[in-house]
Image (spheres, rainbow, N blue to C red):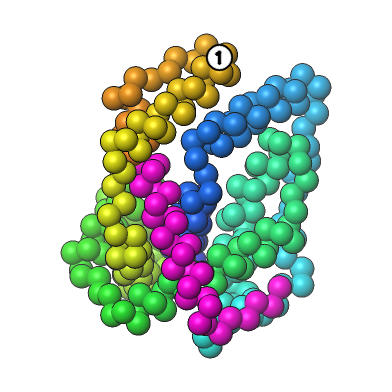
Amino acid sequence: MTLNKKWLLSLLFVAFVSLLAACGNDEEGASDNKEQEKQEETEQAESGEQPEAPEPDLEGVPEVVASVNGTEIKKEEFETTYKGQFQQAAMQSQMTGQELDQDQLKKQIAESLVGQELLVQEANNREFTASEKEVDQTLEEYAKQQQVGSVDEFLAALKERGMSEKEVRSQVQTQVKIDKLIAEEAGDVKPSEEEIKEAYDKMKEQQESMDTEQEVPSYEEAKPTIEQQLTRQKEGQATQKLVDNLREDAEVTVNL
């Protein structure tokens, strides 16, 4: 992921979108997509055709993209987030050969930014806090994810792009509070052994039906990954439910 002045806002956004996406995805669907993409890539390679990469169309984006309970989501924040998500969507479009609907993507991102702002406001309303220790631990996780070595190197990379340590820590503090909010709403999301086994059996059945040479991992090998996926699904469902409830009582205007 490209580092820039709004990188952490985008990171927060991506975390939020990932949670929401988890609610609608199961392993069977993911396997279907991967198999379809592989087939389409093969067909494109055989035909020698490669769809032209689209460019982000940000013409006509208003200065205030949306308003959430009086808090404005500005054009700058939207554009930064859009460009980051657009890259992923464009790659997907090239792999599938399907034209990217930028109007739809803009609306999805605007709605997700509204959801993100609702979560930020609710976390503050419930007076969640983030200690220095929690912020430090989260920064260490980010540095590890980005493979930049130490937290100091991570902060230095952000500073080069105009984001001060104070700004970074403020954004991380917000992320920690949202994490606590979602944890409180989701409750115990640890999947049962029965749920994990059921998901494994579905995955195994799917892979065997595909008639591929790929070896099906054992239950013990696959269990940690399946457990993580099921946990994210439950967190995603809780997040979506919370956002929907908050939006019902919120004053939201989207200008796209």
Tell whether 72 sits left or right of 61: left
| Residue, far bottom | 70
User: Is 54 located above or below residue 45 in the figure?
Assistant: below
Q: Is 222 one of the magenta-colored residues? A: no
Q: Residue at x 39, y 43 (%)?
A: 230
Query: Residue 85: where, in percent of width, then height?
Result: 59, 54
Q: Write down the residue under mark 1.
A: 212
> Does any portion of residue 51 appear in the rendered image?
yes
**Disc 1 residue type (three-letter):** Thr
Query: Which residue is more in the foreground, 252 or 78?
Result: 252
Q: Give me the residue at 76% from left, 37% from top.
A: 97
> Dot 1, how many residues are within 10 Å of its Cα: few (below 14), some (14-19), or many (20+)?
few
Residue 25 x %, y %: 52, 44
Q: Secondary structure at mark 1?
A: loop
Query: Most prominent secondary structure in the magenta stretch?
Result: helix
Expressed as whole percent of the image width and height from the top left, the position of residue 142 reads 34, 53
Instruction: Tell me which residue sits at (61%, 78%) in the image.
Output: 66
